[in-house]
Amino acid sequence: MRALLTLIVASLALIFALPLAAQDSLPPAPYAYQQLEDPAQEEAAAELMATLRCLKCQSQSIADSDAPMAGDMRHQVRTRIAAGEDPEAIRAWLVARYGDYVSYQPRVTASTWPLFAIPVILLLAGLLIIRGRLRKSK
């Protein structure tokens, strides 16, 4: 009975470990580490990649990150630039796919407007407080 239980546990561990081993064996996307032949297209791709956030690293752009997901995103950017797509259209596609967080240049939307309004409100409140204190001191 104990041998059967050990066999079942070992089999389950092997089954759950197989997907992890399969993910590491995938080759990187072709344009993940290879630049485009046209210098103008590569420059446009590099400028766009510098403004897109790696979703795994979160503090690096996809141009700086070595994460496999960043490599896939660099491949997508270069492939679409090589096909003649506009960089802003590519950004819009990535934002639609991954959310506003992927872009270092956030848009003002119904869910992000407080992020833009709160600093202005705090600045105005600070100025009103300073103005009131200056009036009291005179």
Image (cartoon, helix red, strand yellow):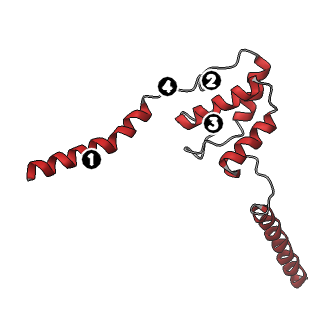
Asked whether the beta carbons under mark 2 and mark 4 sit within 8 Å of each other, the answer is no
Q: Which residue is mark 1?
A: 12
Q: Quote the CA–CA distance across marks 3 and 1.
A: 36 Å
Identity, as a three-letter code, of the amino acid under mark 2:
Tyr
Q: Quote the CA–CA distance across marks 3 and 2.
A: 13 Å
Q: Which residue is mark 4?
A: 27
Q: Which residue is mark 2?
A: 31
Q: Is 6 left, or right, of 28 in this rendering?
A: left
Q: Quote the CA–CA distance across marks 2 and 4.
A: 11 Å
Residue drawn at (69%, 26%) of the image: 79
Does 130 sit above or below residue 2? below
Q: What secondary structure is marked by label 2?
A: loop
Q: Is 20 left, or right, of 5 in this rendering?
A: right
Q: Quote the CA–CA distance across marks 1 and 4.
A: 27 Å
Q: Nearer the viewer, mark 4 or mark 3?
A: 4
Picture coordinates of residue 137, whole percent (x, y) = 87, 82
Q: Can residue 86 be seen in this snapshot?
A: yes
Please rate how many residues cluster around mark 2, counting C-alpha atoms within 10 Å: few if below 14, some from 14 to 19, many from 20: some
Q: Which residue is mark 3?
A: 62
Residue drawn at (79%, 34%) of the image: 87
Asked whether the beta carbons under mark 1 and mark 4 sit within 8 Å of each other, the answer is no
Q: Quote the CA–CA distance across marks 4 and 3.
A: 18 Å
Q: Is 79 left, or right, of 66 in this rendering?
A: right
Picture coordinates of residue 47, whole percent (x, y) = 75, 32
